[in-house]
Amino acid sequence: MEVAISTEKRRLGIRIAPVGVLVGFAMSEIGKGKYLYDVVTVAERGQIVIPKEARGHFNIRPGDELLVTGDIKRGIGIVKAPKMKEFA
């Protein structure tokens, strides 16, 4: 049984399962230059796969260094390490 979802989430193709898990949506542009890529699963060793579209948009290649940032209220962010030097 699916729970009720907002019109915006329905437009984006996001469905919320009764346990609150996002399921079944593909990459969507939600604003100019802003995207929802996909839901990824954390593997046993803590690894995730960055969706192909995201790797393409941000030119992420094998061997690139990524900086993982966090904000307790807003969540986790990932940025290419060289890009972060511009803000330092």
Image (spheres, helix red, strand yellow):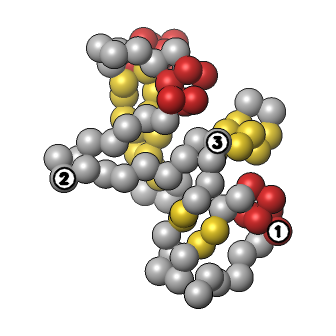
Residue 27: which numbered mark, if any? 3
Q: Nearer the viewer, residue 75 or 24?
A: 24
Q: Amino acid at mark 1?
A: Thr
Q: Which badge, 2 or 1, comes first in the chain's sequence?
A: 1
Label 3 or label 1, whichever lies nearer to me, is: 3
Q: Secondary structure at mark 1?
A: helix
* Residue 19 in view (yes/no): yes
Task: Give above or below for 65 relative to 1.
Answer: above
Determine the CA span between mark 3 and mark 2.
25 Å
Q: Which residue is mark 2?
A: 44
Judge left or right: residue 62 versus residue 72: left
* Residue type, mark 2 in image: Glu
Precedes in sequence: disc 3 or disc 2: 3
Which residue is depicted at the point 50% across and 59% down? 73
Name the disc covering residue 72, or none.
Answer: none
Give the vertical position of 59 relative to 50 (above or below): above
Residue closer to the observer: 33 or 1: 1
Q: Which residue appears at 62% of the width and 82% of the height? A: 2
